[in-house]
Amino acid sequence: MKNMRSMRLARLTDRISIQFKLIGAYIFIILIPIILFSWYIFNGFYHNTIQDTLKKNQYALSSEKVYILNNMEIMLRTAQFYTADKELMNYMQSPDDLEVPELVDFNAKSFSNLQRLMFNNPNITNVRLFTDNPNTMEIWPMIFHESRISNRPWYKSVLEQRGELRWEILEDEKDIMNRATADNRAASTYVSLLKEIEYPSDRHVGILEVDMKIDMFFQKVFSPLQDDQSRMLVIDRSGRMFTDTGSTFFKDIDLERLRRDWAERPHEEGASFTFMVGDTPYLCLTTPIDQMNAYLLNVVSLENQVTQIRHTRNLFIAAAVVLIALLSVITYFLQSLILKKLHILRDSMKKVRRGDLNVQIDIDAGGEVGELAHHFRQMMKKMNELIVEAVNKQAATKEAELHALKNQIDAHFLYNTLENLKMLAEVEAQYTISDALTSLGALMRYSLKWSSEYVQLRDELQHIRNYVAIMNMRYDDKLDLQLDIPEGYREQEMLKMSLQPLVENAVKHGMRTERTRREGMAIRIRAWRGDESTYIEVTDNGAGMPGEKLAELRGKLVMDDVRFQTQYGRGPSGEQEGRGIGLRNVMQRIAMHYGSEYGLTVDSEEGAYTRVTIKLPYLILSGGLSADEKSAYR
């Protein structure tokens, strides 16, 4: 499917004229850098804008945190002042009911001072002390019995902390004094400091509560004078979120989803993340308020920054498009002038295609088009010459076919003559001569009949038997041919006449010594398989060769043709013997048909042996491999 699409695309592009291809390439070359450059520039603008916005709003977040910590310090000092008042502590844990004069004295001195302290700090809304002493009388609005708060959800948590401070955000806290209001609820939500009072030590006296209205405690969170592009929120330990929900800033923001997104991310100092609401990106910054186990968030809209970047980007792209369109029009007219002569050349080629080989191209301009016209004229001249030459070759081919037929007739005459001589030898009981003529006839038929480059190993072995039989007439049966070929390898594919040069070399060079002429020589051929290759080894126990001659022969096998002809190919034809040309030809044929990883290797030891090994791809022509494997090897 992918190849089909590629072919269709290639056919489509082939139909487009070179003029439009050049314009398209021109636009493409300009457009790619513009896209990459704009992406890089505006991506950098966006990240720089985010970083500037981040720094600006981190500073605002830090300023609000400092203000919150100051409020916490005020509330903490107020609590410390109340718990350090000994008269107040004695009053709260008095074992007996106080007389009226004592109550009047306490109210006039200690209680009035404590009330004055609370009223002098306008940020402090309430200071309340709750005692479980039944002998202590309630003095509104500061001293109450502990039973009034025993059902509050934070009451047990304060007792469990054993005198440690606990900060709570009390949302819609009921009026302790049960005064009549519209719904019997407090008018505001408070941030409260709660602490168990133990005096003098490990003795429960009561619970202290210092309240500050939440809009006073978190001033910027609830201030209506904030920047319309950002708002702050507070999330307490239980995950409740507090902010000015009436602000138009949050009209499109799902605060519950924002809380979930925030909960899934790190909450350490300076942490931030971005989120999308429709097409508008937002930035959320976080800072912890460790003492309260709460977090202060600053949510910033990036709509103005992104809109400005998009506007600048659109202007840049529009300018680039106009520039590309203008350049394309100019390029079109310039190319029309440049390609005019090329169109003339194209029309001339169409005439040639229709059979007009006498086309005259009148283009003498310089440059590439002029050079192309010159080469086209030369090509037409060469074509006419080749046509004449082809006609002459056709006539020569007919003559060669007649000559080949004559040679074939001569070969048949030679085969028939050998058959007649063989029959005459048998009639005269000259069986040695008869066998020699049989081997010679088979040898000639195998050598002259060349229908394919490839044969089976069994065919080459039969040819070698005939060759050795004839050579034994010369050497008085001193040659012993030993075949160690498993039956499964006799159908191995190999190149025709690639085994005889190895055996011929073994006979020619191995029978030169006095020992082999006297005792004879054995030629052993064996085959085996290694990995995915077949190895055929021809070994003789003849003269062998010295190390320097062996090295020279190995060098000849791998030497390039120019160097070989320069170094070894200039001598008289009678001196070619012993130069390794036969082995080199076999080596080159195997490499040409099967690949450079296949070929010959030669080993020898002077006076002992010579061994030539052929490496071929494992390919059994019938049986042994599946059809797919044979196709893969082919």
Image (cartoon, rainbow, N blue to C red):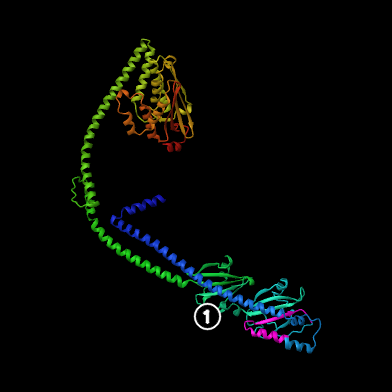
Which quarter of the figure has residue 269? Answer: bottom right
354 sits left or right of 249 in the view: left
Which quarter of the figure has residue 20? Answer: bottom left
Q: Is residue 158 magenta?
A: no
Q: Is residue 179 above or below residue 3?
A: below
What residue lies at 32% left-to-right and 52% top-to-bottom?
14
554 sits left or right of 252 in the view: left
Tag 1 secondary structure: loop
Span highlighted in magenta in the image:
110-134
Instruction: Inspect the image, locate mark 1, and give the three-letter code of the amino acid beneath it.
Output: Leu
Structural crowding at the residue carrying mark 1, measured as other residues with C-alpha within 10 Å and reported as few (<14), some (14–19) or many (≥20): few
Q: Is residue 353 above or below residue 562?
A: below
Q: Residue furthest right?
A: 96
Residue 417 on image: x %, y %: 31, 17
Q: Is residue 118 magenta?
A: yes
The count of marks equals: 1
Which quarter of the figure has residue 193? Answer: bottom right
What residue lies at 20% left-to-right and 45% top-to-bottom?
357
The residue wearing badge 1 is 225
What residue lies at 35% left-to-right and 14% top-to-bottom?
423
Q: Nearer the viewer, residue 259 or 184?
A: 259
